[in-house]
Amino acid sequence: MADNHNEGSRFLQSVHQYFDNAARYSGLSSGILAQIKVCNSVYKVSFPVEIDGKIEVIEGIRVQHSHHKLPSKGGIRFSMQVDEDEVKALATLMTFKCAVVDVPFGGAKGGVKINPRTSSVKTLEKVTRRYAAELIKKNLIGPGMDVPAPDYGTGSREMAWIADTYQALKYGETNALGCVTGKPVGQGGIRGRAEATGLGVYFGIREALADSELLKGKNLSGNTMQGKRIIVQGLGNVGYNAAYFCQQDGAVIIGIAEREGGIYNADGIDVEDAFKHRSETGSILNYKNCRNIENSAELLETECDILIPAALENQINQENAGRIKAKIVAEGANGPVTKGAEEILLANGIVVIPDLYLNAGGVTVSYFEWLKNLSNVRFGRMGKRAEEASYRRLVNAIESSSGKSLSAQEKAMLTQGADEVSLVRSGLEDTMINAYHEIREIMHQKGISDMRTAAFLTAIEKIGVSYEALGIFP
């Protein structure tokens, strides 16, 4: 555990370094900056759970970094490596991530020391419900207070258990389902949440590719995704969806790196089929027409236009950063590039699109899920048919005035009303585009040369405005 504690401390330290670096450009007072930097509250709890007839004591933690906006928001991870400093670092990043994409939440994060891979479903349910009850007791969870979500080691199943526990203990509360996000669709979840982070990564990369000024001299012609060669590390939820949407838009996925190794094909890999191959065989290796790469870390150093590290933190570090040949490093995961590594990448003229902005698609769509739970109605339910009727009248008018008629397929396409998925994706696209241009605007205004410092600064400025407007109580 000592080892992991050092990792956690280093992670927190690097987040603070990024913060300090950006804060130099801010006109806010040192007192406000100090308030923005620290975690507001840390709650640690130990509780007994009966597992196979024996009592075991489980440790849990919930960190709320900022209350400049309520509720605070952040995932819960289940792992034996849960460490206070790491959770603090992740909670801190959540605050800035929400601010960058204008999601009105403070940042939080939670963790429970348990191994989800070796624990039975029954044990996991007991522990999840008991952890939720501990948070409810201290008023540390609720639709207006603190809204958790899935993270490493948890998923929609655990979120459904937490929501059910909350509803049981807060019986009759109208907005109870809004106490967590990332729930199954049938339990108050939202369509489009599963692919949200990866789709956000795609939107962010697409904006960067259209930014000729940022990519001057990089020889990335065309300002579009078409023909760009991409290597992805991690074929989990984020990596898979990011690669899939980039491929749909004409990019060529030439390499996929996973824990067990990597695969490479200069002519391109069918992401959907490779994902299916891994699900069926348990390994990405030996996929058709691909060269196996035994040490998947080598793939990160292979020549490509865009590298998407979408697995774990610290994958690109001072040791390998000098050998990275990509023109753009797009952070799909949290913290995949260390501070020292980023300095090397920037010195080598590589553009880094930071996690703070690029993987904020998940929290953006979590925000939409929360809004859906508070309004207690599915997006598109009220307006879809009215929209379709209006489009139909328009098409009929065009047909009668032009004397030409459209095919049934064309009519169906032109008269389709917006359903939940299309509204969620449209909201996510708008969010990622606006946030990108805000970051670029700050880079121009302040003469900042890298996107991460600018992203931190936009977040700091927005949070500072909130604190100054709120005043200090009492």
Image (cartoon, grey):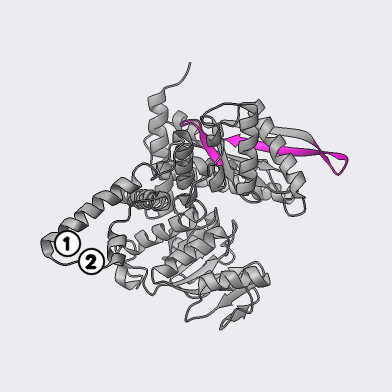
Graded by Cα atoms within 10 Å as few (under 14), some (14 to 19) or many (20 or more), the crowding at tag 2 reads few
Nearest the viewer among 32 and 252 is: 252
Choose top left, top right, bottom left or bottom right for residue 397. bottom left
Name the residue located 40 percent from the left edge and 30 percent from the top edge. Answer: 466
Q: Secondary structure at mark 1?
A: helix
Q: Secondary structure at mark 2?
A: loop
Nearest the viewer among 108 and 364 is: 364
Q: Amino acid at mark 1?
A: Glu
Estimate the x, y position of residue 448 in percent, counting from the top left.
36, 51
Q: CA distance from mark 1 to mark 2?
A: 7 Å
Q: Can residue 65 be seen by looking at this rendering?
A: no
Vertical comparison of 30 with 339: above or below: above
Choose top left, top right, bottom left or bottom right for residue 383. top left
Name the residue located 52 percent from the left edge and 70 percent from the top edge. Answer: 272
Residue contact between numbered discs 1 and 2, judged by CB atoms under 8 Å = yes
217 to the left or right of 162: left
- Tell whether position 299 is magenta: no
The residue singled out by tag 2 in the image is 406
Nearest the viewer among 465 and 414 is: 414
Q: Amino acid at mark 2?
A: Leu
Estimate the x, y position of residue 253 in percent, counting from the top left.
48, 73
Q: Can residue 399 be seen by looking at this rendering?
A: yes
314 to the left or right of 448: right
The residue singled out by tag 1 in the image is 399
